[in-house]
Image: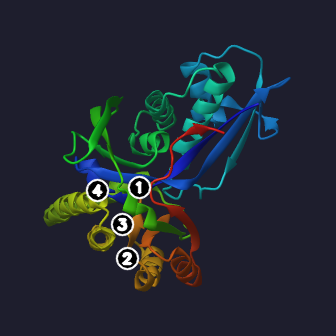
Amino acid sequence: MASAFAPGKCILFGEHAVVYGHPAVAVAIDQGVRVSIEESPDWRLEGMPFDPSRHPHITHIIQSIFNYDGPPLALEVQSDLFSAAGMGSSAALSNAVGAALHNHLNSDEPLDNIKLARLAHSAEATAQKGRASPTDTATSALGGCVVVSGEHVEGTRHIFDTSLVTPEGKRDWSINVVDLPPGICEAWLVLGYTGEWSPTGRMVANVAKLMSEKPELSDDMEAIARITKAGLTALSAGNLEALGMAMDACHERLQRLEVSNPSLDRLVEAARPHALGAKLTGAGGGGCMVALAEDPQRVAEAIEVAGGKPLTSKLGAEGVRVV
């Protein structure tokens, strides 16, 4: 049996602004998806017959990427991520399937995490009808802290470039990483899940409509870009207090863009007295918030009392790997 694990992700800065060409900063988290693969008399997924049409990510990887024509396979999937909550669960699944299948077919060859990131992005694009950002897939593959932008971002280390032809035209991205300083290990992330589904496409469309109706909100997008750069500087220096302040400021701008909601605001406000900073993470409209904490247990308790489901992770987990 071949098994692989790929982490989920949390966006620290740049959600929504990334759509308008500004950088997005994401970190891998401890939680993720584990996939195990072994040969079987027939195709199975989690003990049930495998229906390719219902699982476009997996089908694309097996058929289009690996061109697999061997014996049927049985796949088992275990996830400790909240689904449709902005944690990158589908990207983690794609990376874990790719890594597990690579190990099944080429157990003597080490994983190429950049190749896996490209593979998973291709699977995401296929499943999303030609539209997919590489943020989730690159963060899950590479681990640590990843910065995705239309160009190289100062203060980061460039890893690779990628592009995608979408229904709206060709998109180009630069994938960069931030080398986290040793002192950052004192920091924890506590994610709080609202229990509400986060509809990314709808939220992006709502922001676009709001921006067309209120052009002055472009100032908030520019402000998020400035906050993102300040947050990157704080992250690179291991300045946790400045990092938390940038998170607070980012949430306020996202509120002005109407992507937060009462559930997210309630969890953010509950976490802040015990955290260095807190904000929504991802598309908004539900999903998760995230707090930067030195006492993660206290923050998790506050989130739970406020009605959220907490998850605790170190800041910047390891990327996809064979297990």
Between circles 2 and 3, the one closer to the viewer is 2
Are there few (<14), some (14-19), or many (20+) residues within 10 Å of tag 1?
Answer: few
Q: Which residue is mark 4?
A: 236
Residue at the spot 29% in from the left edge and 67% down from the top edge: 239
Say what amino acid the circle numbered 3 marks. Val
Spatial CA span between label 1 and label 4? 33 Å
Residue at the spot 77% in from the left edge and 21% down from the top edge: 72
Residue 102 versus residue 266: which sits nearer the camera? 102
Q: Position of residue 194 (x, y in %)?
A: 54, 71
Q: Position of residue 279 (x, y in %)?
A: 38, 70
Q: Which residue is mark 2?
A: 276
Q: Is residue 283 above or below residue 32?
A: below
**Local secondary structure at mark 3:** loop
Spatial CA span between label 2 and label 1? 31 Å
Residue at the spot 63% in from the left edge and 20% down from the top edge: 108
Residue 171 versus residue 161: which sits nearer the camera? 161
Looking at the image, tell me whether mark 2 or mark 1 is earlier in sequence order: 1
Quarter-wise, where is residue 250 in the image?
A: bottom left
- Where residue 159 is drawn, which disc sits there? none
Spatial CA span between label 3 and label 1? 10 Å
Q: Which residue is mark 1?
A: 202
